[in-house]
Image (cartoon, rainbow, N blue to C red):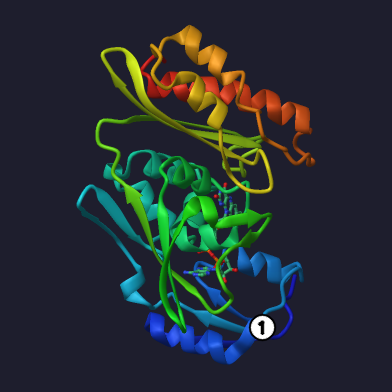
Amino acid sequence: MIPPEFDYTRVSSVDEAISALTDGGEDAKLLAGGHSLVPLMKLRLAAPGLLVDIGGVEELKGVQRSNGSFSIGAMTTHATLQFDEQLGLLSVAASEIADQQVRNRGTIGGSIAHGDPASDLPAVLLAAEAEVVAKGPNGERTIPVAELWQDYLTTSLAPDEVLTEIRVPAFEGYSHGYEKFTRRAEDWAMVGVAALVSVRDGTCEDVRVGLTHMSSTALRASAVEDALRGQPLDAERIAQAAELATEGTEPPADLNASADYKRHLARVLTRRALEKAAGLS
Ligand SMILES: Cc1cc2nc3c(=O)[nH]c(=O)nc-3n(C[C@H](O)[C@H](O)[C@H](O)COP(=O)(O)OP(=O)(O)OC[C@H]3O[C@@H](n4cnc5c(N)ncnc54)[C@H](O)[C@@H]3O)c2cc1C
C-alpha cells in the first residue's frame, strides 16, 4: 500500500495550477481531496510523476447563487454540499456519499473529474443538466455534463485543464427523490437513482431521472421521462414508467451484483425515487 515516488507542489491559484500541469506534462495530476487518486496510487493503478495540490486555492471553494442557478467551486467538499439545504437534490445525494470523514475531504470537482460511474453526484448533475467550467492554457470553456463523462474513469477534460466551477440550475418549483442501494451502510452505490419532478394541477410538467452505476458512465433514464412528461403523476403511471428504467443501460456486473440484479434495482429504485419526488411516499 505504498505509492510509487512522485514530486509534489502546492499552488495557490488556478493559473499556477495550469502552469504546473503544463510544465509537468501528461505525468502531472491535480490533487484535490485525494480520496480517489491516492487509493489508486497506493494500489499502483495510477503513478503520476507530479501531484499539483489545489487544496489551498481559495477561489475554487464555496457555493454562490445568482440568476436562478448555483455556482459551485470545484474544491467545494461533499460536506459543504451536504449541509447546504438550498441545494436540494444535490445536498441529499452528497449526504449519502461514504462516511463523514470522506465527505469532509472529497470534493465535487474531484468526483466529477474522476468519472467513476458508481459516484453519487454525476447522476444528479446529469438530471439537473448542469454544466462545468474548465480552464486550461488556451483559456476557459463551458462543458454540458452530458458531454463530460465519456467512459469508465474517462472524461473530456484535457490533462492540462482545471475544472473550476459547476453551474447547477436552482430548480424552483421542483421536488426531488434520491435512492441509493448499498450492500453495507456507507458503501458505494450498487445502483442509485436521482429524480426531479415538477407537477402542475396533478400533471407532470417536467421530470428528470439520472441513474448511477447502470453503465460505464452515469445515464439519464430518458424512456422513463418520456413516459411521464405531460401525464397525471399517480402511483400507477410511475410504476409503469419505472419498468422502462433499464432501456439503454449496460450495467457492469461486479462482486456485489449481477447485471440482472442491477436492472431489477434500477426499476425498483426509480419507482421509489419518483414516488418520493411526487409526494406519494
Ligand atoms: C472509503 C471511500 C468511500 C467512498 N465512497 C463514495 C461513495 O459512496 N460515493 C461517491 O460518490 N464517492 C465515494 N468516494 C469517493 C469520494 O467521493 C472522492 O472524494 C471523490 O470521488 C474524489 O474527490 P477528491 O476531491 O477526493 O479527488 P481526488 O482523489 O483528489 O482526485 C480525483 C481525480 O480528479 C482529478 N481532479 C481533482 N480535482 C480536479 C479539478 N478541479 N480539475 C480537474 N481534475 C481534478 C484528480 O487529478 C484525480 O484524477 C469514496 C472514497 C473513499 C476513500
In the rendered view, tell whether residue 43 sits above or below residue 81.
below
Q: Nearer the viewer, residue 3 or 238?
A: 238
- Residue 19 spot, x, y in % from top left: 48, 89
- Residue 52 spot, x, y in % from top left: 53, 82
Q: Nearer the viewer, residue 30 or 181?
A: 30
Horizontal side, residue 180 vs residue 86: left or right = right
Q: Residue at x 41, y 50 (%)?
A: 130
The image quadrant of residue 38 is bottom right
Horizontal side, residue 139 vs residue 227: left or right = left
In the rendered view, tell whether residue 57 sits above or below residue 241.
below
Q: Nearer the viewer, residue 151 or 55?
A: 151
- Residue 270 spot, x, y in % from top left: 54, 25
In the rendered view, tell whether residue 242 sits above or below residue 148.
above
Q: Residue at x 75, y 67 (%)?
A: 43
Which quadrant is the C terminus positioned in? top left
In the rendered view, tell whether residue 14 sits above or below residue 188.
below
Q: Which quadrant does ligand 1 occupy?
A: bottom right
The image quadrant of residue 189 is top right
Q: Residue at x 51, y 63 (%)?
A: 110
Horizontal side, residue 246 vs residue 160: left or right = right
> Which residue carries the number 1 mark?
27
The residue type indicated by label 1 comes to Asp
Q: Which residue is drawn at 67% across and 85% down?
A: 49
Is disc 1's CB within 8 Å of ligand 1?
A: no
Which quadrant is the N terminus positioned in? bottom right
